Amino acid sequence: GVLEMKRLKKRMLANRGFSYVITSVLMICVLLIGVAVFEVIRLYIQAGAVRDKFEDSIISMCVENYSEMYQPIRESHASSYAFNGIRWEERHKANEQYIRTYLNKAMGVGEIMQCEIVSISFDVDSPSVAPADTDTAKKYAVSGSITIKVPYRFAWQELAPISLKLDVKSQWRALF
C-alpha cells in the first residue's frame, strides 16, 4: 500500500522519462474510466426515455379506451363488460399495434431512435363485474413490459447491444 506508493513516487522522481510514461498510462486509464462512466449514463438516459415513452403509450391507450376505464357505477357493473344475452363478457380495444405505432412515432427522433424494440407484452386488468364495494374493488389497469436493445460502444468500438426489460403500469381511478 503506502510503501509501494512511496517506492513508485521515488522511482518516478529518479527517472524523468519513466514519469512521462506512467503519467501517460494513468491519463489513458482515467480517460477509459470516464468513457465507461459516460456510456453507462447514456444507456440509463436512453432506457429512461424509452420507458417514459412506453408509459405514455400505455396511458394513451388507456385514455383511448376511456369507456373501459369508466368507474364501475353504471348499473352496478363495469363498462369494460358487455352483456351478450347470456352472460357478461370482457370487452376492451387495447392492442399491441396501438403501442407499437405510438412508440414508433415517439422514438423516430432524438437519441432513443437508436434503440430497437425486441418485444412488447401487456395485460389488461378489468374491474370486477358488479362489485359490492366500488371503492375497494379492482380498478381498470394496464400493465406492460417492453424489452429493448440499446447499442453500446466502449474503447472506440461497437460492442454487442445491451438488452433491457422495462415494466410500467397504468391504473385508472376516479378523482371525484
Image (cartoon, rainbow, N blue to C red):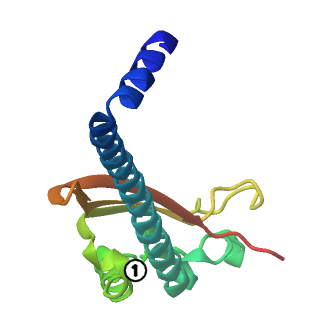
On the image, the x and y values in percent for residue 37 come to 41, 51
Report which quarter residue 122 is drawn in: bottom left
Give amino acid for label 1. Lys
Instruction: Specify whether residue 135 is in view.
Output: yes
Residue at figure coordinates x 27%, y 39% from the top left = 17
**Total of numbered circles in the picture?**
1
Residue at the disc numbered 1:
93
In the displayed structure image, the side of residue 146 where residue 45 appears, left or right: right
On the image, the x and y values in percent for residue 159 come to 16, 55
In the displayed structure image, the side of residue 141 where residue 15 appears, left or right: left
Disc 1 crowd rating (10 Å Cα; few below 14, some 14-19, many 20+) is: some
In the displayed structure image, the side of residue 5 where residue 164 appears, left or right: left
Instruction: Identify the secondary structure beneath mark 1.
Output: loop
* Image quarter of the C terminus: bottom right
Residue at figure coordinates x 44%, y 58% from the top left = 41
Of 64 and 154, nearer the camera is 154
Instruction: Specify whether residue 99 is in view.
Output: no
Residue at figure coordinates x 35%, y 88% from the top left = 109
Location of residue 57 with respect to 2 vertically, above or below: below
Residue at figure coordinates x 57%, y 83% from the top left = 66
